[in-house]
Amino acid sequence: MPSLTPRTFARKLQVYVGAVACSSLAMTIWLSHSARRDALETRTHEQAMTQVKAAAEQLDAFVNRIGMLARAIAARQRGIGPRPDPAVMSFLTQLVRDIPVEEVYGVYVAFDGMRWDEPLAMPWVDRKSFPNLAQI
C-alpha cells in the first residue's frame, strides 16, 4: 500500500503550495462572506429603522388627531360651562358623523359636578347608538 506522506522534495513542495493556495482561497471566501454579512446586517438595520420611524410618525399623527378631538370637546365645554347644554347631543352626533369609523367608535362628555344618574351627566354617542344618545 502506497504511503500518503510525500517523500520527495518536489512532492512536499506541491502539497505545501496546494495547502497554501487552499488556505488563501478559504481565507478570501471567509473574509468576503464576513464583509458581505456585515454590509447586509447594516443595510437591513437601516431599512428596519426607516420603517419603524415611518410607523412611529403615522402613530404619532393618529394620536395627535385623536387628541385634537378630546381638546375640541374640552374647549367647547369650557366655553359653555360646567353643566351640559341642550346642543350637546347634536355636537357629539356631528363629531361621530364627521370622524372616520376606523378612528373613533364613540365620543362622550362626563360632568364632574353631576351625579351619575342625573340626565346628561355623561352623554355619549357611539356607532351602535348613532344618531341617538346612549344611556348609562
Image: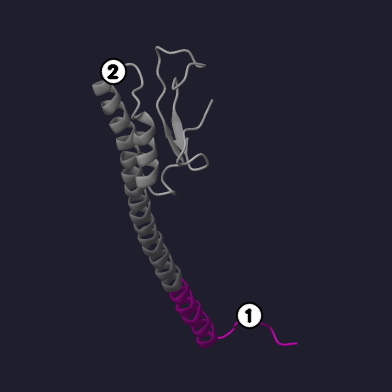
Residue depicted at x 71% and y 87%: 2
Number of other residues with Cα within 10 Å of mark 2, as a class: few under 14, some 14 to 19, many 20 or more: few
Residue 4, by quadrant, is bottom right
Q: Residue 46 at what x, y percent from top left?
A: 34, 57
Label 2: which residue? 81
Q: Tag 1: residue type?
A: Thr
Q: Residue 54 at what x, y percent from top left?
A: 33, 53
Q: In the rendered view, does 22 fall on the left or right side of 86?
A: right
- Secondary element at tag 2: loop
Q: Is 54 placed above or below 8 here? A: above
Is residue 19 a member of the stretch shown in magenta?
yes
Of all residues, the one furthest to the right in this rendering is: 1
CB-based contact (under 8 Å), mark 1 and mark 2: no
Q: Which residues are magenta?
A: 1-26
Which quarter of the rendered picture does the C terminus lie within? top right
Q: Residue 89 at what x, y percent from top left?
A: 39, 32
Label 1: which residue? 5
Q: Is 134 placed above or below 103 here? A: above
| Foreground disc of the pair 1, 2 | 2
Q: Tag 2: residue type?
A: Gly
Residue 39, by quadrant, is bottom left
Q: What colouring does the structure picture have?
A: one colour
